[in-house]
């Protein structure tokens, strides 16, 4: 399953509109729609905001993607992301899964503290 589809599924499971989630994620409904259809590049910061709006942590989000991929690496998890995010994901794939979770948790902590813009 792709990133956009998982975001959309989560939103629909919560019975929320594009407008409701987009507002909480500080974006517009058109942008969120394009993200859900993988027609819009997605930065890590935007993904974090969307995960927060959908009340799921970034680490839980990626764990769900891996689970749906049968525990295997995703064939192209970075397809919907910008260049820097694709590089980051490629680099993360070289890190053992237990350490990857630690990196995601540290990233979430940094973003929540406001150190990333």
Image (cartoon, helix red, strand yellow):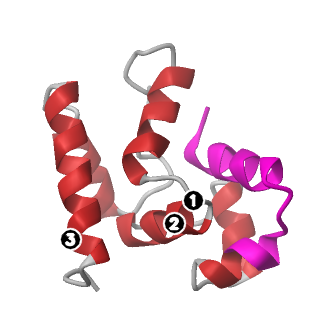
Residue shown at 41%/52% (left/top)?
Answer: 58
Residue at x 17% of width, y 48% of height: 103
Q: Are marks 3 and 1 in contact (CB under 8 Å)?
A: no
Direction from residue 38 to residue 15 in the image, left or right: right
Residue matched to label 3: 110
Mark seen at residue 85: none
Q: Are marks 2 and 1 in contact (CB under 8 Å)?
A: yes
Q: Is residue 87 magenta?
A: no
The numbered mark, 3 or 2, whose residue comes first in the sequence reads 2
> Is residue 42 placed above or below 6 in the rendered structure?
below
Residue 42 seen anywhere in this rendered image of the structure: no
Task: Read off the magenta span.
Answer: 1-21
**Label 2 sits on residue:** 52
Residue placed under numbered mark 1 in the picture: 55
Above or below for 86 versus 90: below
Answer with left or right where residue 26 lies relative to residue 114: right
Residue 23 horizontal side relative to residue 99, left or right: right
Query: Which secondary structure lies at badge 1?
Result: loop
**Residue 29: percent from the left, percent from the top?**
75, 78
For disc 3, the neighbor class at 10 Å (few under 14, some 14 to 19, many from 20) is few
Name the main secondary structure of what is drawn in magenta.
helix
Quarter holding the C terminus is: bottom left
- Is 14 contained in the magenta span? yes
**Around disc 2, counting alpha carbons within 10 Å, would you say few (fewer than 14), some (14 to 19), or many (20 or more)?**
some
Nearest to the observer: residue 102 or residue 82: 102
Whether residue 10 is visible to the viewer of this picture, yes or no, is: yes
Q: SS of the residue at dot 2?
A: helix
């Amino acid at each position: 399953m792709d990133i956009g589809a998982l975001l959309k599924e989560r939103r629909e499971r919560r019975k929320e509109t594009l407008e409701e989630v987009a507002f909480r994620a500080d974006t517009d409904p058109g942008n969120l729609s394009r993200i859900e259809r993988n027609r819009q590049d997605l930065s890590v910061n935007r993904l974090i905001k969307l995960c927060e709006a959908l009340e799921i942590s970034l680490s839980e989000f990626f764990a769900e993607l891996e689970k749906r991929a049968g525990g295997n690496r995703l064939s192209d998890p970075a397809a919907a992301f910008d260049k820097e995010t694709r590089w980051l994901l490629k680099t993360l794939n070289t890190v053992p899964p237990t350490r990857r979770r630690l990196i995601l948790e540290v990233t979430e902590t940094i973003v929540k503290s406001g150190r990333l813009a």
